[in-house]
Amino acid sequence: MKKALALMLAVVMLLSFTACSKPAAPAAAEPAAKPEETKDNWKIAIVTNTVSQNEEEYRSAEFVQKKYGADKIVHELWPDNFMTEQEQMISVLTKIAADPDIKAVVINQAVPGTNPAIDKFLESRKKDEVLIIYASPQENAPDVSARADVILQPDELSMGSAIPNQALKQGAKTFVHYSFPRHMSIPILAERRELMKAECAKIGLAFVDATAPDPTSEAGVTGAQQFILEDVPKMVKKYGKDTSFFSTNCSMQVPLIKAAFDAGAIYTQPCCPSPYHGYPSALGLNVPEDIVGGLQDVIDQTTKIIEDAGLGGRFSTWPVPAAMMATIAGAEYAVKWLNGETNGKFDTKVLAECMSDYAGMDITLNPYVENGVAYDNYLLFLVDFLTYGKLPS
């Protein structure tokens, strides 16, 4: 496993914030629903992508299962090609629904097709008796908010300002945004791009809107990764080394980091912020068996490699893995709900405590706002940057 994460993250795919309020089951209006006899007869199902899709999600579920035992934590997987295997996704949730002891479901990521699968699940289970948590949903906000009790996602919209400003601190003069039509059809990602573009204009960065191949298209993951490896040097030649690169797609992070590193350019943040996302494979790190407890070791290795290359301050990410935090904190919240330690299904105070306990720092949660509507159970979180080396003065 020493190299497993580094190798597998190379093929990570897809993924992968004053308005009128539309409450989605606020705690004050909801009875403190919880299953009967929760102290003993409960199970939590955690659904993640496979190792090849996102190892952080997979390993975080393993971590929870090891903590509470396989008799309490059921770990199920989405199919690798979930975009074309929707029926298999429904089968996964149907299997979970058949176990009456499963009284909470944590889904990370809530990829396209999750909503129909949950609809099938709820045909045989009462929604009031089951806690449903989504992480990083990729379907429309009104639809996911109506189905999930709690939704967790990195604050993509605040990143529209945070990422360009971090890039500026790193010495960037140009900001390149790689994406493709399918991702730009996702409202939150499209809005983030527009916010990035506006922020770049405000702070004096040139914004370059670059289209890359979709990894789910005929080009596949390999074709998309090869495009990045070939295109970044062209961009650096055209705009110079003080160019920061960003991509909306997970499978592009490894080649993007490698190409930016080799060219001496700037890389501000992965699409899914984490010290594990892209960096280990791109830089050839030794990854510990315990990727939850071994985080600081990976950060130290990354810092040394980047500083030894004379690129200190030009690479950054979040200090905690966003995907792992969503799984672990979501599961801990589910345990507290099952044991009657929350004020109903939706208790932001307890949820923030669960996330802070994992991250070792305060976590702020804000409702997602789209088209002037606030979805109170759709919570966004933001963490300050970890910069490898000192920022330029």
Image: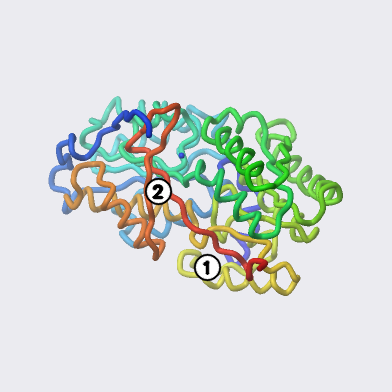
Q: Quadrant of the N terminus?
A: bottom right
Q: Residues within 10 Å of mark 1 (few under 14, many from 20)?
A: few
Residue 144 percent location from the top left of the image: 39, 31
Residue 379, can we see it? yes
What's under tag 2, amino acid-wise? Answer: His
Q: Residue at x 73, y 35 (%)?
A: 211
Residue 212, can we see it? no
Q: Which mark is residue 75?
A: 2
The front one of 136 and 29 is 29
| Quarter where residue 20 is shown | top left
Residue 25 percent location from the top left of the image: 25, 33
Q: Which secondary structure, mark 2?
A: strand
What's under tag 1, amino acid-wise? Answer: Glu
Distance, label 2 to label 1, CA atoms, is: 19 Å
Give the answer, above or below, for where 78 lies relative to 278.
above
Give the answer, above or below, for where 143 lies relative to 107.
above
Which residue position holds label 1? Answer: 289
| Quarter where residue 70 is shown | bottom left
